[in-house]
Amino acid sequence: MFLWFIFASLLCSASARPSTQTLETPFSDENDTEDPAEVRSAAIKRLLEVFGMDDPPSIHGHKQAPQYMLDLYNTVADVDGVTKDPNLLEGNTVRSFFDKLRSEQVEFSFNLSTVSREEKILTAELHLFKLRPQASLTFNRHHFCQVSVYQVLDTSKSNSTQDKKLLSSRLIPVHSAGWEVFTISQAVRSWMMDEDSHLGLHVVVRTLGGSSMDMKLMRFASGRNHHQSKQPMLVLFTDDGRRSTSLESRDLHNNAATPTLPKSFMSGSSSRMARSVLDYSEEEAAPAPCQRHPLYVDFEEIGWSGWIISPRGYNAYHCRGSCPFPLGQNMRATNHATVQSIINALKLLKGVDTPCCVPDKLFSINLLYFDDDENVVLKQYNDMVAGSCGCH
Ligand SMILES: *[C@@H]1O[C@H](CO)[C@@H](O)[C@H](O)[C@H]1NC(C)=O
Ligand SMILES: *[C@@H]1O[C@H](CO)[C@@H](O)[C@H](O)[C@H]1NC(C)=O
Ligand SMILES: *[C@@H]1O[C@H](CO)[C@@H](O)[C@H](O)[C@H]1NC(C)=O
């Protein structure tokens, strides 16, 4: 299993404690009649939890991800999904939404029901694709126009007589074509606090003199009449507050995750499922020194290729090997591990094992996927790839 290296480290540290008799004891009561399908479903449920989900999103038919999200993913992640630079994104989540009004007018509304309450909205952007003016109107005295994005307000709820609030405004060349981005973070934050206040956005185009402008001259692609690649889009940069549980801070003795693990996770002999899903080879107690080995997690074999757009899988790596005395430089041993290996070698105390070969550096990966509402989401997950191994 790809969580194997985490469990292995728990197992190793348990066996290193003098009070625990043998390595096998906690997991040896494995029931061979245990239904493999049940184990598989329990394992996959636990894996979903690692990815912060209760159920796998259901996707109907072939959907296309917005180019913006594909480009963003390729900017932050390498081909295996590993984060190139942890400082590129401020938060750990980027969500895209298509306009649900699909109106002929320049009015937009978005269904944000998939954004959780805990998610902090860092930035919200309205992305509009500006079309070229229609040819017959090209010779026009206007070169620039003022484009303003308004939040539609409920006049019955507030004392204000205003029915809309200006969010963003700027000059745009009339003859340009391409994406225009407007920041509307405050409006989205207010929608998140009160769903009923979400009455949509309204875009107004004026000449520099302030008079209203012919919308034939200044057109934005709409969800109704234009290709999907030009659809109006809301992009949210958020943070869900999930932080890395660092190796140091993880309480090995009271780890809540351990008791919920299906027993078969730990078995080398009968976890056929683990072996078919994840490509790792297990050799019997190889005396090779502590080293990093490949551990490929294949989303297609897990059955997640329908909703995960990228990557197809990733190499989590795992750490395996012995940590005997004397621990060399390349073992990246802690002082504690060095002392433990000396006590072990001198057999000064009973039950003190050699140190454990565990990940000592972990990298995050990125997932580009469809959520329950078929919006495309980019999410970063910490501590998913063993960057290096050491004796600890
Ligand atoms: C194994 O599981 C089956 C079904 O859950 C149960 O009937 C049986 O008693 C178990 N055997 C052992 C040795 O735990
Ligand atoms: C938003 O989407 C959810 C899930 O698809 C749906 O249950 C809800 O009715 C939608 N809300 C609106 C206002 O359309
Ligand atoms: C509207 O304003 C009046 C007087 O200024 C005030 O008494 C009332 O509470 C306000 N209502 C709301 C909904 O803010």
Image: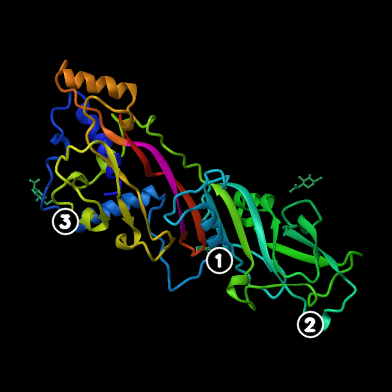
Residue behind label 3 places its C-beta within 8 angstroms of ligand 1: yes
Q: Is residue 273 magenta?
A: no
Mark nearest the camera among 3 and 1 is 1
Real-space Cα separation, disc 2 to disc 1, in angstroms: 28 Å
Residue under pointer 3: 35
Magenta-drawn segment: 359-368
Residue in front for this viewpoint, 333 or 45: 333
> Against 1, is 113 above or below?
below
Residue under pointer 2: 135
Residue under pointer 1: 66
Which mark sits nearer the N-terminus, 2 or 3? 3
Q: Which amino acid, mark 3?
A: Asp
The local secondary structure at tag 2 comes to helix
Mark nearest the camera among 2 and 3 is 2
> Against 232, is 1 above or below?
above
Q: x%, y% of residue 212?
A: 86, 69
Q: Which amino acid, mark 1?
A: Pro
- Left or right: 359, with 79 as reference point: left
Which mark sits nearer the N-terminus, 3 or 1? 3
Real-space Cα separation, disc 2 to disc 3, in angstroms: 68 Å
Which mark sits nearer the N-terminus, 2 or 1? 1
